């Protein structure tokens, strides 16, 4: 009984069937927009920041993520460096804590 009613309901419609993949087009477009407007620029910015951190040398003036302006005193190892805040204060920082080279 149910199957005959279902068949009669479909035979009466005159709408043109659209392919099912068409419903995914808006989702695909949103993903592409997010990628090109948000993800890709962020990746480029992070890449240039990592290059800047990798090229630091003694004597460079830097700004840390905590807002401290300092001068690189020495490079301790691949993950940390010593920053000179003033003539008598030296502090060890992680390289990832460097926000910008001034």
Image: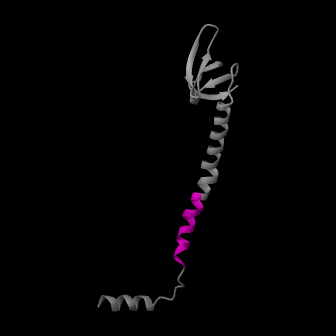
Question: Looking at the picture, does residue 87 appear above or below residue 82?
Answer: above
Q: Residue furthest top?
A: 88
Residue 17 is situated, as x and y percent measured from the top left of the image, at 53, 83
Q: Residue at x 62, y 44 (%)?
A: 42
Location of residue 21 (image quadrant) = bottom right
Q: How many marks?
A: 0
The colour scheme applied to this rendered structure is one colour
Residue 49 is situated, as x and y percent measured from the top left of the image, at 65, 35
Q: Is residue 11 magenta?
A: no
Magenta stretch, residue numbers: 19-31
- Compared across the picture, whether 20 is left or right of 3 comes to right
Judge by depth and name the residue closer to the eye, 83 or 42: 83
Judge by depth and name the residue closer to the eye, 70 or 94: 94
Residue 23 is situated, as x and y percent measured from the top left of the image, at 53, 71
- Compared across the picture, whether 102 is left or right of 29 comes to right
Q: Quadrant of the N terminus?
A: bottom left
Q: Quadrant of the C terminus?
A: top right
Question: Looking at the picture, does residue 45 appear above or below residue 53?
Answer: below
Residue 86 is situated, as x and y percent measured from the top left of the image, at 63, 11
Q: Is residue 22 magenta?
A: yes
């Amino acid at each position: 009984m149910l199957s005959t009613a279902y068949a009669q309901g479909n035979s009466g419609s005159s709408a043109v069937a659209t392919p099912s993949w068409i419903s995914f087009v808006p989702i695909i477009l949103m993903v592409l927009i997010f990628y090109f407007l948000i993800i890709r620029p962020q990746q480029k910015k992070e890449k240039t920041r990592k290059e800047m951190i990798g090229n630091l040398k003694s004597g460079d003036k830097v700004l840390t993520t905590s807002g401290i302006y300092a001068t690189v005193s020495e490079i301790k190892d691949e993950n940390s460096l010593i920053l000179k805040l003033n003539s008598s204060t030296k502090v060890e920082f992680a390289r990832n804590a460097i926000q910008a080279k001034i």
